[in-house]
Amino acid sequence: MDTRYQVIIVGGGPVGVALAVDLGLRGIRCALVERRLESPRIPKGQNLTQRSMEHFHAWGVADAVRAARLLPPSYPMSGIIAYGDLASRYWYAPPLREIVNAYYFQENERLPQYRTEQVLRKRMAELRNVDARFGWTAQAIAQDERGVRVTVAPDGGAPHVLEADYAVGCDGGHSLVREQIGIARSGSDFNQLMVLALFRSRELHEKLNRFPPRSTYRVLHPDLEGYWQFLGRVDVGESWFFHSPVPADTTRDNYDFHALLQEAVGFPFACAFDHVGFWDLRISVAQQYQVGRAFIAGDAAHSHPPYGAYGLNNGLDDVANLGWKIAATLAGWGGDALLATYTEERRPIFTETAEDFIEAGIRRDKEFMARYSPERDRDEFERAWKEHADTAAPRVLTYEPHYEGSSIIFGPPNGTSSAHGSHTFKARAGHHLPPQRLSSGKNVFEELGRDFTLLAFDVDDRAVTGFEDAARPLGVPLTVVRDTYAEGRTAYEAKLMLVRPDRYVAWLGDAVPTDPAAVVRKAIGRG
Ligand SMILES: Cc1cc2nc3c(=O)[nH]c(=O)nc-3n(C[C@H](O)[C@H](O)[C@H](O)COP(=O)(O)OP(=O)(O)OC[C@H]3O[C@@H](n4cnc5c(N)ncnc54)[C@H](O)[C@@H]3O)c2cc1C
């Protein structure tokens, strides 16, 4: 059995398998080690952002992911937010992530994570350079300047040592890789136990007909200090999941979950439970995402409650950021500084996501519930509730992770990498490339290369050859997309854009820079 690889991925949840697909498509020989044979059928990780769907498009599975959804096509993905319970007169149905669809090449999607994982696993199985070992557990990891060694064992079998140039721990919140390479975490522990119940109830489906069709139902109750009771559809008509804070000593056997559910919805209904599990409301971020030749990604690097659906989506963004950097380094064109930019670019995004979007949301709701009450002052409450409703969607517009401050981006002076941003069709260095139609009728995303792409709109040949001549001796694969600077493309407000493999703009301008080689060198970490 061959035991030498370029990359060993520990953990075959959605993030590990996505990384195997990304690296596999880049021609990297990797091993993926996953202790479970099947993904648990828990419908978590359902809300997929537009960015995640763009990654799926790049990995050739966007259509398969959409075909695996359980809700009917175009069934609204956003939710209802209610005060007190779902029988309340105070509720609203805000548009959420769909309001930024136009700024991405793919629309957001909703399906249970285990269905997404099935699609990814199928794609991975098509890649001959990926050696997937399901039912194998990683027991230890060691590294030196030449490579990494991961001790793995099949269920009940003898251990083997696998060797590689790099290893990536995609092994979830309790990451062995993170612990063994010595990365500490910081974050907030809310000391709050949560229940996750899966149940079936047609009656609930029918009784919620008072609302417009929606996928999720969030209850804000004054006693819950800003934590939500959260009901969601797994399909339309029958299957549901339910999260709620519960007392710390709750077990499956000492608590009436049916009564809790009925309190949350505000009326009696019959249901049959399929699963009751628990999770701790905790947010943690690793201090760094790399030590030497070992990296961490996904929940191993940052874990969080399912508030706002940042978990899986952030993990997939980690993959898109790290995959090309490892592949470029292995291919020899990635510079010495390239791999360190993974922590540099990704960590601030999650730190701010945790503090400013997840924790701030919990705090905001806690303060709201403490301050306003329809029993105490109805007029004041109704004014505040309207504001609660009016500010939900605008906040979505401000979540736009970008790398303006990255050392391999030509961002603005004093730019910082941040989860806070804005949505626009203007191209900006350090930001996601907005989609645009080319004169061929295709979207620019359909023409981007797997590595770097130069978008050249109505520029003279010297501009293009300047970049080609710069990229060639450095070994950087460069796809050139030429078109006119007309129609929607003028919204970019730039005629030349150097787009990274993860579809972020590294550099832009209207004319060839004085030293295109310096631009390319910086973008690949050789600056
Ligand atoms: C109830 C719930 C709802 C959620 N909803 C959303 C949502 O709507 N949107 C969203 O973006 N996120 C959501 N999340 C978060 C999302 O599910 C996680 O962020 C996601 O699963 C992270 O994927 P991962 O691959 O990093 O880690 P995991 O899914 O934890 O996978 C890690 C894998 O590593 C394997 N492993 C661990 N140790 C070893 C070892 N030593 N050897 C071999 N294998 C090992 C494990 O078996 C596991 O398969 C939700 C989470 C929960 C709990």
Image (cartoon, grey):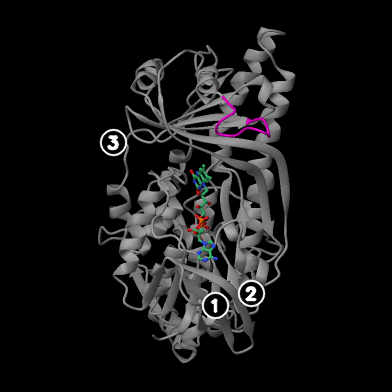
At label 2, which amino acid type do we have? Answer: Ala
Location of the N terminus by quadrant is: bottom left
* Disc 2: CA contacts within 10 A as few (<14), some (14-19) or many (>=20): some
Looking at the image, can residue 501 be seen? no
The numbered mark at residue 340 is: 2
On-image quarter of the C terminus = bottom right
Is 351 contained in the magenta span?
no
Q: Is mark 2 within 8 Å of ligand 1?
A: no
Foreground: 101 or 93?
Answer: 93
Q: Mark 1 falls on what kind of element?
A: strand
Cα distance in 3D space between marks 2 and 1? 25 Å
The answer to which of marks 1 and 3 sits earlier in the sequence is 3
Element class at badge 2: loop
Eye-nearest disc, 1 or 3: 1
Residue 72, which numbered label? Answer: 3
Contact between marks 2 and 1 (CB within 8 A): the answer is no
Looking at the image, the residue that sits furthest to the bottom is 473
Q: Amino acid at mark 3?
A: Pro
Rendered location of residue 134, percent (x, y)? 40, 66
